[in-house]
């Protein structure tokens, strides 16, 4: 039996996407014209195409029975792992500014596997914690803690090797949140926290450009025309928006103030156009989205669906808050896109796929078939047999 799909979450998802589409339309034409020989709506058209793919995956994950998703999960996780490794192979992996985060897909362009890894890790851990709980293996010992930790660290290490520190940290944080809600001991989080801080610090100071970003964050006045230029222009756009904004299509983006207003700094363009009122409207919408998503997570009786929804919600919400914090200068520049808003096919496709999974979870009334059958007939199976 199933509940009806959470209409609140449907509305929140569509509104977030719609607002992002409007923002892309009003903020990117001039930049696109400069970069693509007068093609003013290059980013808009590409965003629509990528969104179409994303909505197709949303429907796929929303409609497919949860037990079938679980059966396909090993293939999904291994496929994502393979795509992440392909970034290191010459002529397949694409290197930009010293980072190998993308792969070349014929007739489609580039794709960033680390975005897909966010989703894969969430479902991998959700399935693992559910299986361990049902089989009795998750018995609050260190061994049950180390198994999922190994899988998490494998993905995080690969993403770090791609020189994508911010995405790696985000995956680590989301994974840690799933450890917490699944019932792991609080005392185990101290070494996990220490490990994360140590790895983040070492990787930050290993790369010169990250050190420059960090210094520019603490001394912005000294780097206004270099490392801190984009942040300085972002703040300028935000301040110029005032309370009511400068209106649609009349903002500073009409001149080249924010170099990447279509990407990580698109929220500055929205704020400049719509002002403080626009910021409040976005925050209200984000809170509404988070409320509906977490409501599904905490009310679904299917543990796999609940944990998966929780992880997806944390990923989208934390990423949104972090991006806004960067744009406002509250934290150092990270390169994290704003879900639903920032240009980038990988981001919008994976975000909508996550929303599809959460909508599926909102319809679960009883645990999925595989969960029930596993409880009754496979309770004694080992972890290695269940998750190959």
Image (spheres, helix red, strand yellow):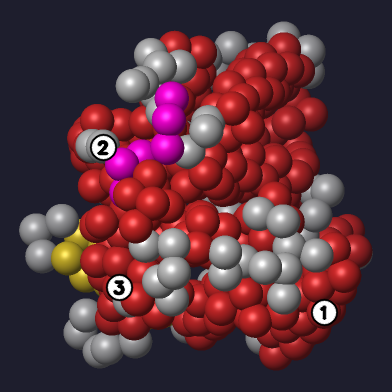
- Which residue is label 1 attached to? 191
Residue 88 x, y percent position in the rendering: 34, 87
- Is residue 217 visible in the rendered image? The answer is yes
Q: Nearer the viewer, mark 1 or mark 2?
A: 2
Mark 1 lies on a secondary structure that is helix
Q: Is residue 6 left or right of residue 225?
A: left
Q: Residue at x 81, y 72 (%)?
A: 188
Q: Is residue 3 left or right of residue 45?
A: right
- Magenta region, mostly helix, strand or loop? loop
In the rendered structure, which disc, 1 or 2, sits on the residue that comes first in sequence? 2
Residue 272 x, y percent position in the rendering: 66, 25
Q: Residue at x 72, y 56 (%)?
A: 183
Q: Is residue 38 magenta?
A: no
Residue 333 x, y percent position in the rendering: 70, 59
In the rendered structure, which disc, 2 or 3, sits on the residue that comes first in sequence? 2
Residue contact at pointers 3 and 1, CB within 8 angstroms: no
Q: Nearer the viewer, mark 2 or mark 3?
A: 2
User: Looking at the rendering, which quadrant does residue 280 occupy?
Assistant: top right
User: Looking at the rendering, which quadrant does residue 271 occupy?
Assistant: top right
Query: Which quadrant does the C terminus fall into?
Result: bottom left
Mark 2 lies on a secondary structure that is loop
Q: Residue at x 75, y 37 (%)?
A: 236
Q: Is residue 217 left or right of residue 346?
A: right
- Give the Cα separation between the discs numbered 1 and 2: 38 Å
The segment highlighted magenta reads 365-370
- Give the Cα separation between the discs numbered 2 and 3: 21 Å
- Which residue is label 2 attached to? 65
Residue 356 x, y percent position in the rendering: 36, 34
- Which residue is label 3 attached to? 78
């Amino acid at each position: 039996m199933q509940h009806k799909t959470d209409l609140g979450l449907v509305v929140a998802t569509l509104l977030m996407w719609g607002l992002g589409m409007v923002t892309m339309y009003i903020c990117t034409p001039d930049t696109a014209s400069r970069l693509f020989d007068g093609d003013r709506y290059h980013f808009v058209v590409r965003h629509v195409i990528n969104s179409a793919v994303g909505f197709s995956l949303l429907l796929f994950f929303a409609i497919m029975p949860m037990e079938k998703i679980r059966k396909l999960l090993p293939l999904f996780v291994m496929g994502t792992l393979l795509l992440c490794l392909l970034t290191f192979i010459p002529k397949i992996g694409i290197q930009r500014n010293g980072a190998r985060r993308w792969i070349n897909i014929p007739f489609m362009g580039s794709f960033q596997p680390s975005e897909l890894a966010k989703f894969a890790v969430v479902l991998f851990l959700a399935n693992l914690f559910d299986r361990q709980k049902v089989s009795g293996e998750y018995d609050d010992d260190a061994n049950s803690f180390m198994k999922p930790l190994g899988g998490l660290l494998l993905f995080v290490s690969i993403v770090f090797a791609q020189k994508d520190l911010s995405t790696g940290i985000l995956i680590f944080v989301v994974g840690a949140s799933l450890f917490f809600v699944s019932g792991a001991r609080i005392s185990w989080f101290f070494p996990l926290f220490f490990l994360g801080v140590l790895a983040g610090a070492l990787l930050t100071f290993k790369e010169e450009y990250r050190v420059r970003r960090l210094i520019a964050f603490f001394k912005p006045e000294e780097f206004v025309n270099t490392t801190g230029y984009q942040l300085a222009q972002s703040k300028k756009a935000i301040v110029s928006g005032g309370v009511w904004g400068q209106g649609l299509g009349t903002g500073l983006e009409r001149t080249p103030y924010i170099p990447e207003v279509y990407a990580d700094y698109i929220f500055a363009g929205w704020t400049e156009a719509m002002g403080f009122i626009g910021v409040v409207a976005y925050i209200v919408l984000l809170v509404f989205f988070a409320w509906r998503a977490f409501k599904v997570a905490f009310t679904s009786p299917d543990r796999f669906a609940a944990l998966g929804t929780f992880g997806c919600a944390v990923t989208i919400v934390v990423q949104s808050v972090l991006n806004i914090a960067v744009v406002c200068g509250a934290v150092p520049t990270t390169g994290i896109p704003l879900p639903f808003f920032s240009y980038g096919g990988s981001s919008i496709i994976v975000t909508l796929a996550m929303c599809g999974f959460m909508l599926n979870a909102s319809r679960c009334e009883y645990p999925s078939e595989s969960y029930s059958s596993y409880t009754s007939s496979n309770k004694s199976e080992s972890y290695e047999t269940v998750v190959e």
